[in-house]
Image (cartoon, rainbow, N blue to C red):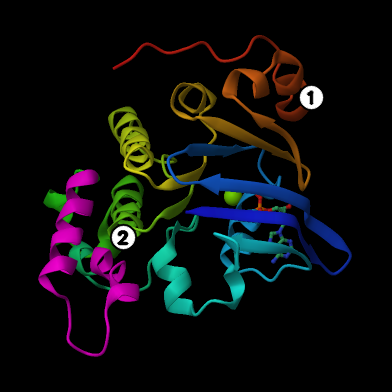
Amino acid sequence: MRLEAKGLSVSIRDRSLVSDASLHIAGGELVGLIGPNGAGKSTLLRALLGIREKSAGDIQLDGQDFLAMSGRERASAVAFLPQERRVEWRLPAYDIVMLGRYPHQVGFGGPTPEDRAAVERALDAVDGHSLRDRPVAVLSGGERTRILLARALAVESPILLVDEPIAALDPYHQLHVMEILRERARDGAGVLAVIHHLALAERFMDRLILMDASRIVAEGAPIEVLTAERLAAVYRIAGSPPQRIPAA
Ligand code: ADP
Ligand code: MG
């Protein structure tokens, strides 16, 4: 599948949070969305999902008007890990991951064996079996991130949008999650991930989209996007582009 936005803008009062953004995510690719704090990355993801109202633009899933689809259709086609990890429910982690199956459930029959199998696969993917019975509210920040990522993975959707999936993770789990995202793309999903870790972005991503001050300012292969000039201009980092880090 292919999710595509053209001329997407989000503004609030007279302030532009996303200006005229055009991008696509196609099945089989892992795309990184990078840019400094406040650039508009999370707002762009939310606008793509229709959670955040756009002021202009067009969003299509395989050529169809995405926002005209039913909530269930949208939720089963495009899964989302929000940047905000607060969880209000006092549910065990397992039940949180099962929420990812909601778009697939019809009527009041409860989870099917297929739903349960998808939850097991998602818990496997995030190394989350030891967390499954613990109330999600008492998990550490990194553990909660992994469980919420598992919820998004459990949807087993053709498109996956994840907002800072490796923030708060220890180095082992950062690499592990990058490998999971890579694997999802290899299995045919289109994955868009907001990421601040530029060395991991360079190593794992097929393509990077760089945002600065509400606009997409560069897009392309990681080595084309992460030039010293851009890092200086956008991130105010002097010096050379990130060194390639050795394979684990
Ligand atoms: P990023 O994810 O790139 O760090 P965000 O998309 O979260 O950035 O935010 C982009 C800008 O929009 C920020 O300056 C933020 O303060 C502002 N912003 C986000 N939501 C709102 C809102 N509801 N009202 C006003 N400003 C907002
Ligand atoms: Mg953000």
The quadrant where residue 93 appears: bottom left
Would you name the residue on which mark 2 appears?
A: 151
Q: Classify mark 1: residues with Cα within 10 Å, few (<14), some (14-19) or many (20+).
A: few
* Residue 90 in the image, given as x and y percentages of width and height: 27, 73
Q: Are marks 2 and 1 in contact (CB under 8 Å)?
A: no
For label 1, the SS is helix
- For marks 2 and 1, the one nearer the N-term is 2
The quadrant where residue 156 appears: bottom left
Q: Residue at x 50, y 28 (%)?
A: 201
Q: Is residue 47 magenta?
A: no
Q: Which one is nearer the viewer's eye here, 66 or 101?
A: 66
Image quadrant occupied by the C terminus: top left
State left or right for residue 73 relative to residue 106: right
Q: Classify mark 2: residues with Cα within 10 Å, few (<14), some (14-19) or many (20+).
A: many
Would you name the residue on which mark 1 appears?
A: 233
State left or right for residue 62 relative to residue 155: right
For label 2, the SS is helix
Q: Which one is nearer the viewer's eye here, 56 or 85?
A: 56
Q: Which one is nearer the viewer's eye here, 31 or 148?
A: 31
- Which span of residues is magenta-colored? 96-125
Real-space Cα separation, disc 2 to disc 1, in angstroms? 37 Å
Q: Is residue 123 magenta?
A: yes
* Residue 179 in the image, given as x and y percentages of width and height: 32, 33
Q: In the rendered structure, which amino acid carries the disc numbered 1?
A: Ala
State left or right for residue 184 relative to residue 226: left
Q: Is residue 110 above or below residue 67?
A: below
Q: In the rendered structure, which amino acid carries the disc numbered 2?
A: Arg
Q: Residue at x 59, y 25 (%)?
A: 221
